Image (cartoon, helix red, strand yellow):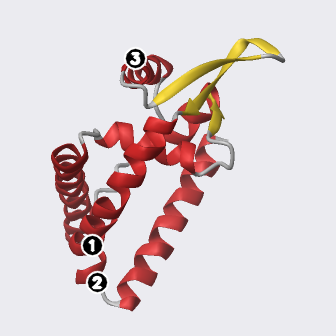
Amino acid sequence: MTRWLTDREQRAWRGYISMQAQLSAQLSKQLQAESDLSHSDFAVLVQLTDVPDGRVRVFELAGALQWEKSRLSHHLARMQKRDLVAREECPSDARGAFIVLTPAGRAAIEEAAPRHVETVRRLVFDVLTPAQVEALTAISEQVLAKLAGEAA
């Protein structure tokens, strides 16, 4: 038997879906206009700046971004052409490779990040109370834990 959403749940779900789509569109537009980076470029660069040596195995990057291998491969090729990232073979695994943050990639994210975070702050955190931020954190962590359990 289907457990249909209640009116309250449906309102919450549709609100979340609409918010996520509009927020993603606004952030993408801001990044492209102000930094010439796509939202996808920014996501890759964030992953690389989150590690000390700016180097991540391709399969780890795919997992962190939740992207299919072909999408990641095509996107990384475009980023390589723009000198934002480089690909280095893995000496211990002939089939594996590292994606490495280039100086140009580091400069691009360092320039884009302050304006991006200001947009996130303006669109999200400036309109929420501290209690709502705590609730958003708790909700995100609980749903992510459920998703991780389902994937395992």
- How far across and down, in percent of the image, does residue 76 sit? 44, 23
Using the image as rendered, state which of residue 35 and residue 128 is in the foreground: 35
Q: Residue at x 54, y 66 (%)?
A: 141
Residue type pointed to by label 2: Leu
Q: Residues within 10 Å of mark 3 (few under 14, many from 20)?
A: few
As drawn, the residue found furthest toward the right would be 92
Q: Residue at x 84, y 18 (%)?
A: 92
* Vertical order, 47 against 118 (above or below): above
The residue where tag 1 is placed is 124
Give the alpha-carbon distance from disc 1 to disc 2, as whole Å.
7 Å
Q: Are the residues tagged 1 and 2 within 8 Å (C-beta)?
A: yes
The residue where tag 3 is placed is 74
The residue where tag 2 is placed is 128
- Dividing the picture into quadrants, the one containing residue 63 is top right
Would you say 140 lies left or right of 58 here?
A: left
Using the image as rendered, state which of residue 139 and residue 129 is in the foreground: 129
Residue type pointed to by label 3: His
Q: Residues within 10 Å of mark 1 (few under 14, many from 20)?
A: few
Quadrant that contains the C terminus: top right
**Circle 1 SS class:** loop
* Vertical order, 120 against 84 (above or below): below
Q: Residue at x 42, y 17 (%)?
A: 77
* Vertical order, 39 against 116 (above or below): above
Residue type pointed to by label 1: Val
Give the alpha-carbon distance from disc 3 to disc 2, as whole Å.
37 Å
**Circle 3 SS class:** helix
Give the alpha-carbon distance from disc 1 to disc 3, as whole Å.
31 Å
